Image (cartoon, rainbow, N blue to C red):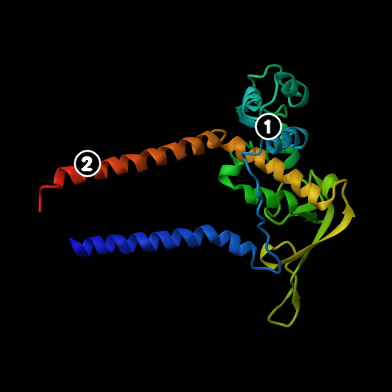
Amino acid sequence: MVEVMHRKIRFGLVAGIATAILSVFPLAAFASGGGSLIQHAGNDVADVASLQRGARNFVNYCSGCHSAKYIRFNKLQEDLQLTESQVVENLMFAARKTDELMTVAMPAADAARWFGQAPPDLTLVARSRGPDWIYTFLKSFYLDESTASGTNNLALPNASMPAVLWELQGLQVATFHDSTGENGNVVSHFGDPAYFESFEQVTEGTMSEPEFDQFVRDLVNFLDWAGTPEQLERRRLGIWVILFLFVFLLFAYLLKVEIWKDIK
């Protein structure tokens, strides 16, 4: 019995270590070049002002192609502390009522024909990819003449999505390490994230770098909230649950002491 328990413990440790390694591996792969690709978003879903700006950014730059079909406009009004008139005037361009979902008007068949595939819904993208990945993706477009859009993305090579924020960020080129082949010839690794070195700005955008970083951070913050709108309430309740368990543990211990006090 003891041996079986030891095996289970060893298996649990190995599984835990393997899970940790696999979860870190994609980040390590991106960072193996001259520069680290994955950047920390540093967003805070408790920042209501950031969420309001993020909702504005999403509606103005994303909602033409991407939906957030699991969120209703009146949910924005409730959680983002907006008035109904603010939601209607600033965030509702196609919907008629605030209880409608944030769907997209673009037909999926047309989108697939124009972009190669229909743009995905973004409600749960922060849960599936993570805020840091989205933040990095939106900042990692670079010029690439071999693609139909003229740009490529370091976080998601050959992405169908063009650099929609190029006017704000400006245009940049990416440099990659070359290697030497078996015959001594130079092997180009252009577009390979493992050989990424750095970005170089070629045209200025309408925003400075700090302003663009904040713009993207607000957008990421909104997507993070949209994936789990109840997360702040869940955290608040979690604190009370932990406090209750501590108090319950104290009473349980005192009860145990009272029951076993006469037993030596």
Amino acid type at circle 1 is Ala
Q: Which of the 4 image quadrants contains residue 254? A: top left
Q: Is residue 46 visible?
A: yes
Residue for badge 1: 108
- The one nearer the camera, 106 or 251, is 251
- Rendering coords of residue 16 (x, y %): 41, 59
Q: Is residue 148 visible?
A: no
Q: Secondary structure at mark 2?
A: helix
Q: Which of the 4 image quadrants contains residue 13? A: bottom left
- Rendering coords of residue 194 (x, y %): 66, 66
Residue for badge 2: 255
- The one nearer the camera, 220 or 49, is 49
Judge left or right: residue 141 versus residue 203. Answer: left
Q: Secondary structure at mark 1?
A: helix
- Rendering coords of residue 74 (x, y %): 64, 22
Looking at marks 2 and 1 on the same chain, the residue that comes earlier in the sequence is marked by 1
- The one nearer the camera, 36 or 189, is 36
Other-residue count near label 2 (Cα within 10 Å), few / some / many at <14 / 14–19 / ≥20:
few
Q: CA distance from mark 2 to mark 1?
A: 63 Å
Judge left or right: residue 124 versus residue 41. Answer: left
Judge left or right: residue 73 versus residue 91. Answer: left
Amino acid type at circle 2 is Leu
Between disc 2 and disc 1, the foreground one is 2
Please tell me which residue is depicted at 52% across the width and 33% down the height of the picture: 233
Residue 210 bears which disc, if any?
none
- In the rendered view, would you say 27 is above or below 87? below
Please tell me which residue is depicted at 71% across the width and 45% down the height of the picture: 217
